[in-house]
Amino acid sequence: MKINGRHTRTIWLNADGWSLTVIDQTKLPHRFATLTLDSMTAAAQAIKTMTVRGAPLIGATAAYGLCLALREDASDEALERAYHVLIETRPTAINLKWALDEMMAGLRNIPRTERVAAAYARAGQICDQDVEICRRIGENGLALIRAVAAKKPGQRVNVLTHCNAGWLACIDWGTALAPIYMAHDAGIPVHVFVDETRPRNQGASLTAYELGAHGVPHTILADNAGGHFMQAGQVDLCIVGTDRVTANGDVANKIGTYLKALAAKDNGVPFYVALPHTTIDWTMPKGVGVIPIEERSAAEVLTMSGRLADGSVAVVEIAAPGSPAANPGFDVTPARLVTAFITERGVAPATAEGLLSLYPERR
Amino acid sequence: MKINGRHTRTIWLNADGWSLTVIDQTKLPHRFATLTLDSMTAAAQAIKTMTVRGAPLIGATAAYGLCLALREDASDEALERAYHVLIETRPTAINLKWALDEMMAGLRNIPRTERVAAAYARAGQICDQDVEICRRIGENGLALIRAVAAKKPGQRVNVLTHCNAGWLACIDWGTALAPIYMAHDAGIPVHVFVDETRPRNQGASLTAYELGAHGVPHTILADNAGGHFMQAGQVDLCIVGTDRVTANGDVANKIGTYLKALAAKDNGVPFYVALPHTTIDWTMPKGVGVIPIEERSAAEVLTMSGRLADGSVAVVEIAAPGSPAANPGFDVTPARLVTAFITERGVAPATAEGLLSLYPERR
């Protein structure tokens, strides 16, 4: 997508042919800044600190993290060591494991001397494939938005989304936002209700930023407000991304997704989850109570970062000193609340059978 | 309740016998400050700016606002004028109308010379009655908490609450928090999950402050997290307050309440609404789509107030400049999602019949 009119991805290989640049997402929306990753440790740190975030981008960054590790030491031991450091950076997004396993499968049985080149080639492919996958998710989701638009000609189509599953979460296009960008570009009057997504505010800081940069009309909401707008008939459909879908169709996504899915169900609003096949965990039969949920720092709940009147960025504490807080990063939405999945292969019900109908090779 | 060991109400008559002092709730939790109300305009302003908030306290402040107006001009015209200014300060809480109507009923047909004294007497009664009502709500809710505690001896009883329906929202005790204070004082190991309650953070800034001051164990959550904790079996019951209950049992309360009620229903967690009879709008047959919902400033969503590292209080902007936001202040929880009401008369199902069983004089 474009930043100031210039086509940009979220991660790219530098002119030196080996180091990477990523957008530092912790600085948005206040400042567009980039960060160079020149070691496996730097890549792991970027994932941990959420300089990069979003399931597909986490996977891509980890893949390049392996490349950077191999540049320093291409031995089997170093490869295994790097795998274990990288896979422990974040627990919930399954794309991380998928990308690392893909890399390992291609690297384990080739000579050390060829490993670095092979690793960079495969990481580059993972990125290019993700872009193509997101483009197809966009096309498949566009058909759903087009169908809603056809039923209310001349009126805006209102989509609610939670967190950020846009191009900043991927390499380009995004998952949940790809259909929205395509609808907007196709002239459909689409408008997005953006949950601010406390505690880290990915909606207000990343999704609103993305949509604004592309000119898509949007309105930021407190996370509390989505149910009210659905009850008032002001939301036509919800589209969210996901960090892991289990074989039965349960969906792990940013904390709060479950509450919006409940409200959608209660008000007959279709609730779609957009994902690449790399987000499906075929090894896990169900998600509720099983998918590991990252417990993040209480400080994220007790503070808020933003711009002061002079334009500088500051962190403020919002509760009384010493107040305790808990901060689960994700929740699991039961498959029964999901209308359908939108993947690069098409749209299917959120059931084991629905997933297998899109990926029959998994039967 | 106590502030620094000293018994305090949220509003009190000063030694001069006519002006009022209120706790300035916009300064909490960073600073305990009070504000003098010495005119009807000051009282109206305190309600509008949420210096005072919470349905019962709004009613009490408006009652004293009428007293202050009459002190300056005890004519029928001045009385009507003050009524109309005060009733338009906030649209959702019905206690405002109840308190003003109570005052008017007692003042219209008495001589001007007696009006000021009669007004202060009635406003004082409204406050004292509210304290007694909240105490009884506490006792009736305590029985429910005691029953949960009896089923899990030695383990903590986990209550989730949204926004602030504690003593800061009332004159003393609170509605939703009164049973919690009584349970704590009775030695029941009660623990409270406190929704931060964006956009104004009444949970993190007021409820956590209140509970902390009284020594009640609590944990602040992002508004997104309650569904996850209910799904994980970590919430025994929810108790919230309300700004208006319609004759069929629909509940207007702080934006986001509806989402928690949905999660409670989905997970079999009892969802109680605590209220004084003054919050029941017997004239409104149902609430969903009918109760007027206050649309507040977008700035509340786009900013956050808190303490900087040097202890000073600052406001930060969290979204990109120019991002639009919407800010409905309340939502309506359909009666079908409410397990029961807790009032000063007892506990009853959230139905028209349930309400009438507690208030048979309304049949």
Image (cartoon, coloured by chain):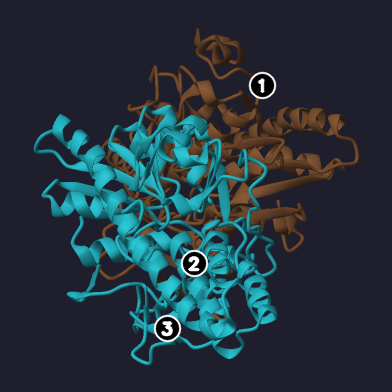
Chain colours: A brown, B cyan
Looking at this rendering, what residue extends furthest in the bottom direction? B16
At x 67% / y 42%, what residue is drawn?
B289
- Mark 3 lies on a secondary structure that is strand
Residue B9 place in picture, x, y as percent: 32, 72
- Please indicate whether residue B181 sits to the left or right of residue B333 in the image: left
At x 46% / y 69%, what residue is drawn?
B60
**Mark positioned earlier in the residue sequence (3 or 2):** 3
Task: Name the chain letter of the residue that bears numbered label 1.
Answer: A
Q: Which mark is residue B20?
A: 3
Residue on which the image places disc 2: B58
Residue on which the image places disc 1: A347
Looking at this rendering, what residue extends furthest in the right direction? A154
* Kind of residue sitting beneath label 3: Leu
Task: Name the chain letter of the residue that bears numbered label 3.
Answer: B
Pointers 2 and 1 within a single chain: no
Residue B197 place in picture, x, y as percent: 45, 56
Which residue occupies the foreground of this view, A215 or B210?
A: B210
* Kind of residue sitting beneath label 2: Ile
- Mark 1 lies on a secondary structure that is strand
- Please indicate whether residue B169 sits to the left or right of residue B77 in the image: left
Quadrant of the rendered image containing residue A347: top right
